[in-house]
Amino acid sequence: MSRDGRIVLTKDGLSLSRLVFGASRLFNGAVRLEVARLIGTAIDLGLTSFDHADIYGNYEVEAAFGAGLSCWRGKREEIELISKCDIMLASPNRPQNRLKHYDTSAAHILASVDRSLTNLGTDYLDLLLLHRPDPLMDADETAAALAGLVKSGKVRAVGVSNFTPSQFDLLASRLPFVLATNQIEMSVLKTSALTDGSLDHAQRLGYAPMIWSPLGGGSLFTGMESREARVRAALAAVAAEVGAGDLATVAIAWLLRHPARLLPVMGSMKPERLAAMVKALEINLDRQQWFAILEASEGRPVA
Ligand SMILES: NC(=O)c1ccc[n+]([C@@H]2O[C@H](COP(=O)([O-])OP(=O)(O)OC[C@H]3O[C@@H](n4cnc5c(N)ncnc54)[C@H](OP(=O)(O)O)[C@@H]3O)[C@@H](O)[C@H]2O)c1
């Protein structure tokens, strides 16, 4: 992936690779050298941006990734580290959490970022996201904590995830800088962002949304419902037209075709699959190919 395909998120020049490596599935007993090898493969493929959250792998992925990263010989500024906070899991690693809930208090955000920095073995995050909208968010308190993190240099930029446009606007109204992104779910199987205002909001404000589960978390390949079967057939037909060897390549090209400059966060841990998806950057679906996949997903032609 060429570096000029990168997406600039902030005025101070923070940019992400067009395809982002999602780390949530990293930890399954992976040892340090395996992690290091996978990080190297991702970087070689042009995926220099790595998406984390404090909670991944029951709060254990960041440290596993940090151990792998410590074997990497490149410079810190050649990659981008993204993390998230505010989901509180009921986990043996957090016995104080009696139930799953959200916490956007200043105390939690600041403590969580410090833990992420330690776990990842870095002194700054390129991007911090609030993971989920918190119904108890005090926008003034949360914004002050986020602004303080940017001022201190611990975080280069701030964004949100799974926020509605209205929730985004509320937080943005209290910040001295723009929110860099909203990381939302979207795929050929999950198209609600096209009509619920999320992508309109992104284009109106000019930020590039990050896209999680861009292959439906794998259900695109394993799903047995008629919708998934229809979408696979449509992807196969388009793949034959554009000469793509993999349905995943076309599914990612479908996202890249949207003018809001979507940044898919890839969840595969298999180098050959990541390589197949990078090929999506060379494919430009025409309108009718794009709409054929939408029609298969919706189960009907557009009105
Ligand atoms: N902000 C949020 O709330 C939120 C929520 C969920 C996820 N995320 C982020 O989004 C990232 C991606 O989510 P995801 O893992 O659900 O993404 P995904 O790319 O939609 O799904 C990845 C899964 O699909 C499987 N898969 C099966 N066949 C595949 C094929 N041909 N090509 C590629 N993958 C195939 C992969 O298995 P293999 O590993 O065996 O290839 C993997 O288990 C996460 O890592 C995380 O960073 C964010």
Image (cartoon, grey):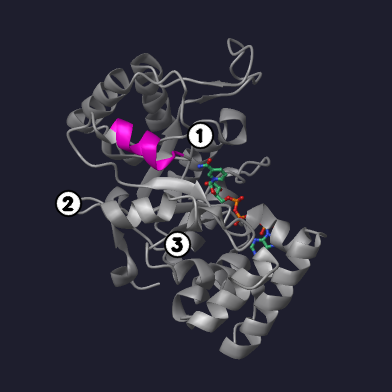
What is the magenta range? 163-171
Q: Point out residue 285 in the picture as x, y percentages from the top left corner.
A: 50, 80
Say which residue label 3 marks.
19
Does label 3 or label 1 sit earlier along the sequence? Answer: 3
> Farthest front residue?
303
Q: Disc 1 marks which amino acid?
A: Ala
Look at 40% across and 53% down and name the residue there. Answer: 209
Q: Point out residue 180 in the picture as x, y percentages from the top left corner.
A: 30, 46
Q: Disc 3 marks which amino acid?
A: Leu
Look at 59% across and 51% down and name the residue there. Answer: 34
155 magenta-colored: no
Horizontal side of 163 relative to 100 (left or right) equals left
Report the mark closest to the observer, 3 or 1.
3
Q: Point out residue 104 in the picture as x, y percentages from the top left corner.
A: 41, 22
Q: Residues within 10 Å of mark 3 (few under 14, many from 20)?
A: many
Task: Tell me the tag on residue 63.
Answer: 1
